[in-house]
Image: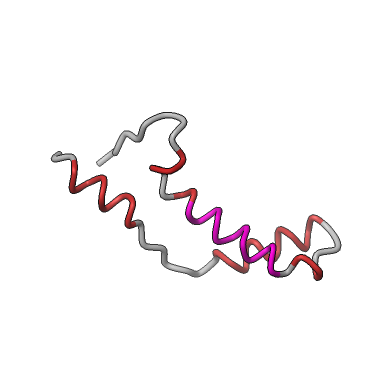
Amino acid sequence: TCILLAPHAPEQNPIEDIWLQGKQWVREKYNECHSFKDVTTYFLEAIEGRRFSFPKLAAYRRSHSF
């Protein structure tokens, strides 16, 4: 099922939470980042192999019947 989210509404888009977690991890590793490759490595380290839950999406599904 395709769920249409409002355009220009990042607060509704669950992928924004994944970006946020990755960016927070990179910020914690700031002193160890000497190149863009380091930033990319730490970002991927933060998100690869993880299972993400999407409470925003679940809330959206409850409010709209399909």
Which residue range is magenta in the image?
A: 17-28
Q: State the quadrant of the C terminus.
A: top left
Indicate yes or no whether the magenta region holds residue 43: no
Percent of width and height locating residue 2? 29, 38
In-image side of 6 versus 29 (left or right): left
Q: Residue at x 43, y 43 (%)?
A: 11
The residue furthest top is 7
Q: Main secondary structure of the magenta part?
A: helix
In percent of width and height, residue 14 lies at 41, 49
Name which quarter of the figure residue 42 lies in.
Answer: bottom right
Residue 37: quarter of image:
bottom right
- When the figure is inspected, residue 66 is found, relative to residue 59, above or below; the finding is above
Q: Position of residue 17 (x, y in %)?
A: 48, 54
Residue at the limit of the structure toward the left, as seen here: 65
Looking at the image, is 53 positioned above or below residue 64?
below
The residue nearer to you, when weighing 3 against 24, is: 24
User: Could you tell me how many numbered marks the image carries?
Assistant: 0
Farthest right residue in view: 34
Q: How is the image coloured?
A: secondary structure
Q: Tell me if 61 is positioned left or right of 15 in this view.
A: left
Quadrant of res 9: top left
The question of residue 20 being in magenta is answered with: yes
Where's residue 62, x and y in %? Answer: 18, 48
Q: Residue at x 59, y 67 (%)?
A: 46
Which quadrant: the N terminus?
A: top left
- Residue at 25% x, 50% y: name it: 59
- The one nearer the camera, 53 or 50, is 53
Which residue does the image show at 77% across and 63% down from the upper left?
Answer: 38
